[in-house]
Amino acid sequence: MSTPILVTGGTGNIGRHTVPLLRAADREVRILSRHADAAAPGIRSFEGDTVKGTGLAEALDGVETVLHLAGGAKGDDVAARNLVAAARRTGVRHLILISVVGADRMPIGYFRMKAAAEREFAESGIPWTVVRVAQLHDFALPIVKALSRMRIAPRGLRFETVRVDAVAARLAELTLSEPAGRVADLAGPEVQEVADLVRTFDAARGRTHRLLPLRIPGGVGRAYRAGDNLADETAVRAGSTWAEYLGERTSVAA
Ligand SMILES: NC(=O)c1ccc[n+]([C@@H]2O[C@H](COP(=O)([O-])OP(=O)(O)OC[C@H]3O[C@@H](n4cnc5c(N)ncnc54)[C@H](OP(=O)(O)O)[C@@H]3O)[C@@H](O)[C@H]2O)c1
């Protein structure tokens, strides 16, 4: 009989799309998050905090596979260390981590923290899989809305945004497969200037604005203009385009 899969952060945007795919593969799922979710068939919720290291032992008991999605603006490196330490004490055989494209290149705390989390997994002694993922369309949308409102666009900033269900499908596939180490990055089908994301957004609302170009200063600006946040030619590119994503949304005008 197969053992339950623990999904940390299974109540988040990516988690909510991934958990049903694991259930569809007939696997029992445990979810760990700081705020436990309502129970559902085949799903058990555990309250815990990966950064504080609480609730992990109970959630991991009897688990062999862990998909680690829990994350926030701070503490993902500490969370990975806590999870690895707890997983070493139980019978975990496969740790899967979602990271971010450019984790080891971008001079920004969030990216450095993701690179540190990757190292925790790679040095854990437990077989692992790490996939770096580009920003979701859902992540870009509030940024694009704000830029549209302010009528500015950082010059040279490019994104390759990806649809959440394409990410969920890849994560479920990796979770149900053997440990693979670092696998190809996952990104959306197009690399686009943020100015073009804003223009497409405005066009979907029947508007056009002149956008004032903005220069991102310092090393961060240089890294973005060099494309250090972008995947290379080995990346898997999947899901619908930004324009298709906007077309599917009824709340674009909001
Ligand atoms: N969104 C993107 O564009 C993107 C791109 C690449 C990689 N990622 C990574 O993918 C992961 C999931 O992203 P998402 O967009 O699904 O995020 P999300 O919607 O913000 O969900 C985060 C999830 O993690 C849980 N969580 C946060 N801090 C926690 C903690 N200390 N202990 C336990 N659970 C915690 C949250 O539940 P509670 O608040 O109840 O604890 C929630 O279930 C993150 O690691 C993120 O960095 C995201």
Image (tube, rainbow, N blue to C red):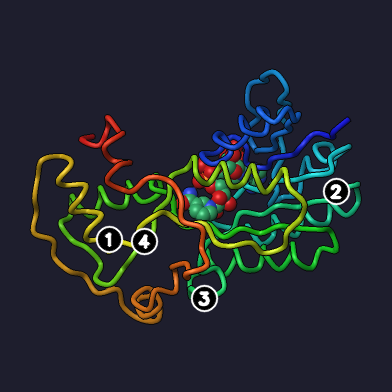
- Please state, as top left, top right, bottom left or bottom right, where the N terminus lies in the image: top right
Gap between marks 4 and 3 measured at Cα = 15 Å
Q: Which residue is mark 4?
A: 159
Q: Could one spot residue 72 in this view of the protein?
A: no
Q: How many marks?
A: 4
Q: Looking at the picture, does residue 114 appear above or below residue 21?
A: below
Q: Earlier in the sequence, mark 1 or mark 2?
A: 2
SS category of the residue bearing label 3? loop
Q: Nearer the viewer, residue 254 or 22?
A: 22
CB atoms at circles 4 and 1 under 8 Å apart?
yes
Q: Earlier in the sequence, mark 4 or mark 3?
A: 3
Kindly identify the amino acid type of the residue bearing the numbered disc 4. Answer: Phe
CB atoms at circles 1 and 3 under 8 Å apart?
no
CB atoms at circles 4 and 3 under 8 Å apart?
no
- Please state, as top left, top right, bottom left or bottom right, where the C terminus lies in the image: top left
Q: Could one spot residue 174 in this view of the protein?
A: yes
Kindly identify the amino acid type of the residue bearing the numbered disc 2. Answer: Val
SS category of the residue bearing label 2? loop
Q: Residues within 10 Å of mark 1 (few under 14, many from 20)?
A: many
SS category of the residue bearing label 1? helix
Within the image, what quadrant is residue 188 found in?
bottom left
Q: Earlier in the sequence, mark 2 or mark 3?
A: 2
Q: Which residue is mark 2?
A: 92
Q: Which residue is mark 3?
A: 105
**Disc on res. 194:** 1
Disc 2 C-beta below 8 A from ligand 1: no
Q: Looking at the picture, does residue 235 appear above or below residue 141?
A: below
Gap between marks 1 and 2 measured at Cα = 41 Å
Gap between marks 4 and 1 measured at Cα = 7 Å
Residue under the point 18% across and 50% down:
149
Disc 3 C-beta below 8 A from ligand 1: no
